[in-house]
Image (cartoon, grey):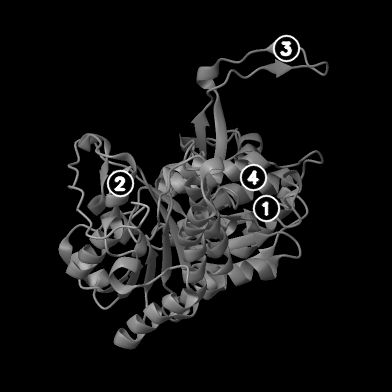
Amino acid sequence: MTQDRTPAPDAAPASPAPWRPSRTVAVILAGGTGTRLGLGIPKQLLKIAGKPIIEHTLAVFEAAPEIDEIIVLMAAGHVPDAERIVTNAGFRKVSKVIEGGDTRNDTTRIALDAVGEGDVNILFHDAVRPLVSARIVRECVNALWTYSAVDVAIPSADTIIQVDQDDCITGIPVRATLRRGQTPQAFRSGTIREAYRRAEGDPDFAATDDCGVVLRYLPGTPIKVIDGSDENIKVTHPVDVHLADKLFQLAAAQVPKLTDHRSYSEELTGRTIVVFGGSYGIGHDLTELARRYGAQVFPFSRSTTGTHVERAEDVAAALKTAFEATGRIDHVVVTAGILEKGALAEMDEETMERLLHVNFVGPVTIARQSLPYLQQTKGQLLLYTSSSYTRGRARYALYSATKAALVNLTQALADEWAEFGVRVNCVNPERTATPMRTKAFGEEPEHTLLSAEAVAQASLDVLISELTGQVIDVRRAPGEPVAAVPAQPGAHPSGLPTGVGA
């Protein structure tokens, strides 16, 4: 193998030997302490979308076929935390979790020592950029066949100004030539080693950016820039936590779909699904669809099986029935809910109690009773919210409040149950054609409503995915036909059915 030796700036260019790296190593830089976030733990350990930020980041490189090995440089005192995450997630490519240095210079040198000698592709990536895409990783690695240094950047949407010590403008660079740097930064090992070797002789050397080291100390080396993405944000400030969480939610809305009936059958045959609220609407359509794909589905509701979701004994009996019949429970789905309209000040105590118990106490009761079963199968609890969870609606304030509570419950349980390998997600369908909605709002133009079957299909996609802690938006595609709202033979005394899709 020929070690890459970048020539000095004044040296005559030579015909380089073809680049033949022995492997490609991703170095995940996780040395931050979370000071700017005001946390007591390093920011890379903060949980977003049900998982620590660093776990999301590692998952991208673990899944990338271009990456052979991953090395983690962790903040001092937190190596065991990172090792637990790696072990629990089953990341096979992570070869080392070691402590980073006090400075960026030290950390890069430690990483280079950990990589070892030989011709290697090295990608340095910030652990707190969890939304880096597979496309960016792939293009970085591919670019190293032609270039010995690669950066990732996006155009600047803002005008950049230069100021002096008095904060007065001294210049305004042309925006078209400016880019905002991201990571990963990728290098042929010989190039980055040589740049740091030369930098050692500079008493003023202080690296904040590895491409900057190459630019300064190997000025004759072209640094290829590939397109980053707006989503590839760095979680640095408190607002970034909220932005990253929302971006994960938007990404989750595009849950990968299988291509044909056979693929779904292969995934679902042999699985046991318990559906609370399986008589009408979304719950009914999910039950029928899953059965067609080979799953064993047990629907329960107040109208057909006498199951009251807010009663622990009813929920326990339902779960026991399914378990005794099949010996397992892989998924528990809670579509049961009621919608009571009216001003809060005018609502009677009985109505309020019924709404709160069915819409919130019920899911909480089901979650508690389901955990022992889901632990055995590493399964999933799937809840349902409503678009009203983001902003309470007049005349159904309690309904909106309970739906917001289910979102928080989803996120909290995904965190609590991660150690058990149990996933928790929440589907947020737009206005859906269900008996409950028709009773509450009357007839509506069909082209404005999502079909319950479409929500059921999206729900199955979530169940067979590896998502957790997500709120998955389901929206009607333009031109999508709407299923007719089925008539329900039974209804709640208030006129609104129970045990139906939200």
| Horizontal side, residue 257 vs residue 426: left or right | left
- For disc 2, the neighbor class at 10 Å (few under 14, some 14 to 19, many from 20) is some
- Give the residue type that dot 3 points to: Ile
- Toward which corner of the image does residue 212 lie, by quadrant? top right
- Say which label, 2 or 4, has the lower sequence index: 4
Q: Which residue is mark 4?
A: 195
- Whether pointer 3 and pointer 2 mark residues with C-beta atoms closer than 8 Å, the reply is no
Of mark 4 and mark 1, the one earlier in the sequence is: 1
Q: Position of residue 434 (x, y in %)?
A: 27, 50
Q: Which residue is mark 2?
A: 439
Can residue 470 be seen? Answer: yes
Residue drawn at (60%, 40%) of the image: 211
Residue 43 bears which disc, if any?
1
**Closer to the N terminus: mark 4 or mark 3?**
3
Q: Secondary structure at mark 4?
A: helix
In this view, the mark in front (3 or 2): 2
Q: In the figure, is residue 479 to the left or right of 63?
A: left
What secondary structure is found at the residue carrying circle 3?
strand
| Mark 2 vs mark 1: in front | 2
Between marks 4 and 1 in the image, the one whose residue lies nearer the viewer: 1
The residue drawn where x is 54% and y is 54% is 349
Q: Secondary structure at mark 1?
A: helix
Residue identified by numbered label 3: 169
**What amino acid type should be assigned to the residue bearing mark 1?**
Lys
Residue 358 location, x and y as percent?
Answer: 45, 61
Task: Using residue 247 as the reference point, say whether residue 412 is left or right of it.
Answer: right
Instruction: Relative to 163, say whether 120 is above or below.
Output: below
Q: Residue at x 47, y 72 (%)?
A: 311
Mark 4 and mark 3: span between their CA atoms?
Answer: 33 Å
Q: Position of residue 391 (x, y in %)?
A: 51, 38
* Gap between marks 3 and 1 measured at Cα: 34 Å
Please report contact status of discs 4 and 3: CB closer than 8 Å, yes or no: no
